[in-house]
Amino acid sequence: MAKVKGKEVGTGPVNFRSPTVAIRLRWVVLWFCLRALGRGLGYLARHPGIVATTAVGVQCYRLWTTGSAWIVIASVAALGLVLGGWRWLWPDSFAQRVVWRIRGSRRRFMEYRTRWDTTMRALKLTVRMDDRTYVPRIIKVRSSGTVDQVTVRLLPGQILTDYAEQSERLARTFGAEDCRVRSAASLIPSWWPGGTEGWMGRYISWVLPRRTDRLVLWFLTNDPLRAIVAPIPAADPPNLQALDVARREDGLIFRLRLLYTHLLVAGATGAGKGSVLWSIIAALGPGIRSGLVQLWVLDPKGGMELALGRRLFHRFCYGSDPAMDGATDAEYEEAFATLLEDLVVIMRRRQGKLRGLSRLLKPSLDEPFIVLIADELASLTAYVTDPAMKKRIAKAFSLLLSQGRAVGISVVGALQDPRKEVLPFRDLFPTRLALRMSEGEQVKLVLTDGARERGARCDKIPESLPGVGYVTVDGETEPIRVRLSHITDEAIADLVNAYAPDLTGPTDPISVSTLEGAAA
Ligand SMILES: Nc1ncnc2c1ncn2[C@@H]1O[C@H](COP(=O)(O)OP(=O)(O)OP(=O)(O)O)[C@@H](O)[C@H]1O
């Protein structure tokens, strides 16, 4: 008979069949006992932690009762120290390996154990074969306190979409606010040094490849993104491959990779695009001060969004510079084109320098990491009035997006309308962040095809949650829900005071009003 890696469920409480062989009751009882013993041993073999804990418990009891209680006390103290140190040094790893597991075991027992089989049957997520019904088996449950991650082994013939289609019903049944269906996580945890991209991560993925017969159901039990996310202290020097910019829905910090990639941010008006740009600037702050990072900024909305931070920027163009007062639209547009073309010149120079030596530029004080931040991209593409300028801007953008990554030039662009007519080079952005959108169709344009079915319901983000969005990274199919930190005008003034590179000697505090005056 076919062997299926699922839990076998009888068709009813008792099966009545015509006996063809008479078996004595004692043999039947013996068979059931042996089978139960075999299953018990199999369970223990799959859960060595239970065996080890029991063995340690028995040993402690023996030591305690034989007058060696000090060994037990010293061992418990040493364990407490190790755990305390682990929590202090690597809080993310400690949370995921210890806290989430303990909480997950409790949630598995209290929530999922009792209702799982009936829910699977009711939602037709079971498989029938040879008169038997198989229910998908829960492999493990991890709970961050805000999200329960239930790892499930798929039955033969099942695909992720089968579960995605039932996600709303699953959420309702298990009392969650939402349910997202994700393919099984890589075996490399997010806190692993270098992440999945590092050499250690790549080696581990080669030895332990991703399990394709598993998926993870993310049950959102208590949304941590309802609360505003305070600015996250910036690392010094910044990790350009993992900038702390947002909080994830599982409560962890979302780390954005910016080096060697470009980021597209899309969202309806008031969705919080400004907070994405400012969170990135805040995370890059220490690098800006040291000269490792240069910001080139375009703010076609007359500097409304970004002028407060002008002292942090190496180049800043917002189309209405006091020096250009009274300038025409064409002159403003020319200023944007010139800035972009200047950056293309730097890109070409860096390419020439690296040619034959290396394929990737490692940012340094001599060759800093350049981030081109462009707010309201549509004003730089579709709404440019002068055809000649439109062509120059489009050409420079295409060159920077297609060739800039390797030489340490990344583009961060924000816009409201993600259609191809508005942003012809949309596909050149490997990393995408979609905030609140007015239509479900737009989600597909910004994120990957099918992202909405897998939970990225950007059109359902309420207006009361600015800064909440879904991010996808090239190569990853599932979007992650995050909320960017909220950087107020006062926080921006603090940022400028702390990180503006032109400050010399004692700090030269500037107030919001001074900056506003400067920007006016
Ligand atoms: N992460 C956040 N947390 C809390 N509030 C936020 C966040 N981001 C933005 N807001 C608030 O939401 C409002 C709109 O934000 P913002 O101006 O950044 O939106 P936007 O997408 O840039 O809009 P527009 O396209 O019209 O410029 C502001 O009042 C801002 O204070």
Image: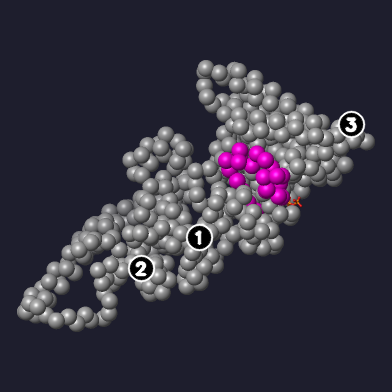
In the picture of the structure, the residue carrying the numbered disc 1 is 180
Number of the front mark, 2 or 1 = 2
Residue type indicated by callout 1: Arg
* Marking on residue 323: 3
Relative to residue 170, is residue 46 depicted above or below?
above
164 relative position to 4: left or right: right
Say if the magenta span includes residue 426: yes
Name the residue at 28% across, 58% down: 47
Q: Mark 3 or mark 1: which comes first in sequence?
A: 1
The percent coordinates of residue 339 (x first, y second) are: 76, 29
Distance CA(mark 2)–CA(mark 1)? 19 Å
Q: Residue at x 49, y 64 (%)?
A: 165
User: Could you tell me which secondary element the residue under label 1 belongs to?
Assistant: strand
**Disc 2 target residue:** 126
* Residue 337 in picture, x, y percent from top left: 77, 31
Q: Magenta residues, as a range?
A: 414-435
